[in-house]
Amino acid sequence: MSPPHGDPEPPGRRVHVGGAGRVRVDGAGGGRVRVDGAGGRRLRVGGVEGGRVRVGGAGDRRVRVDGVEGGRVRVGGVEVDALTEGEVVRRVAAAMEAGEGGRIVTPNVDICRAAASDPALRELVCSADLVVADGMPLVWAARLLGTPLPARVTGADLLWSLTELAARHDWPVYLLGGGPPHVAPKAARELTNRHPRLRVCGAHAPPFHFDATPEGAAEVRGKVIAARPRLVFAGLGFPRQDLLIAALREELPETWFLGCGAAIAFAAGTLGRAPAWMRRTGLEWAFRLGAEPVRLAPRYLVNDLPYAARLLGGSFMSASVRGRGRPPEG
């Protein structure tokens, strides 16, 4: 992606960029960048404050803001937003108040490994409106590469903070997935116990292979669309949840979506979550492995651990080469 030529026009005026859409900068500090695609969909990024805006070529509606809070960092083969959990919530709140939707992807090692071998999955991740690291190896690798992320931001934590946001604003939420049929309704009860004003407009776990037929996928989409939620939490696993979210985005343009994996089961209490110290030290995978060894051993031990080792090893080598290239001090 290449930057637009020349300086932006004064606040509120439009700058046309290479036919891919138009960029409009509203305000000098803390302004918004709006990209209007051919279909009329809009993406706004708040708080530019003098950063450089880069807009992709034809058909690419993503906006990158460099040199400002929340710029994207490339790690593990995907582009991750350098945001804290609180900053994610504020971004979502600002967009929702403006009547605009979006989707959040929280890549971990397993998602990065899948994206590394499949360009379509990599685009599915990187084209999300917000991408935040849900894996400590990504945080460590970014630090080694000299582009540190401020924190790990998990889908499990965002489920609670975004439902708190929804409760404050009376925005209806929908819980989709989580495992067996009783899990999503149980999670809804736990969330409303924490946030009594929360309005849950749907809690539904579709059959595991619901998307094996067009009719099954259409039925699930129809239920979500009919409920008209402002926030949807989809716990169906990657990439199933994210493919469904991408389809729903067209039908619910003012809705925000979070692909949250096991977060609904965590909230319901049907699946235990690792203690905080294990999450901080990158050992949550070991806790999960102990809880579900049959299901997770092939994924974690055969696929993810070797990938994480290669990711960190490559990042360490890059850091070493970068260090040797620096001029001596003094």
Image: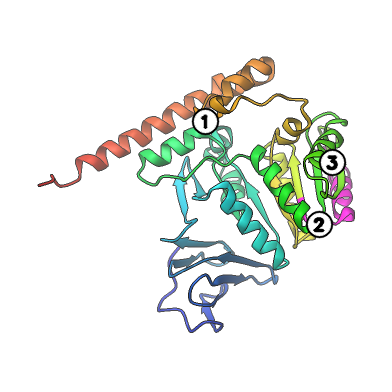
Foreground residue among 200 and 208? 200
Q: Give left or right: position of 52 versus 214.
A: left
Foreground residue among 100 and 55? 100
Distance, label 1 to label 3, CA atoms, is 41 Å
- Which image quadrant is residue 96 in? bottom right
Residue at 54 percent of width and 26 percent of height? 277
Of pointers 1 and 3, the one earlier in the residue sequence: 3
Q: Eyeballing the image, is 86 above or below 21?
A: above
Q: What amino acid is found at the position of numbered circle 3 in the picture?
A: Thr
Label 2 sits on a secondary structure element that is: loop
Of pointers 2 and 1, the one earlier in the residue sequence: 2
Residue 170, numbered circle: 2
Residue 213, numbered circle: 3
Residue 280, numbered circle: 1
**What kind of secondary structure does the magenta stretch mostly adopt?**
helix
Tag in front: 3 or 2: 2
Label 1 sits on a secondary structure element that is: helix
Distance, label 3 to label 2, CA atoms, is 35 Å
Q: What amino acid is found at the position of numbered circle 1 in the picture?
A: Arg
- Which image quadrant is residue 121 in? top right
Distance, label 2 to label 1, CA atoms, is 32 Å
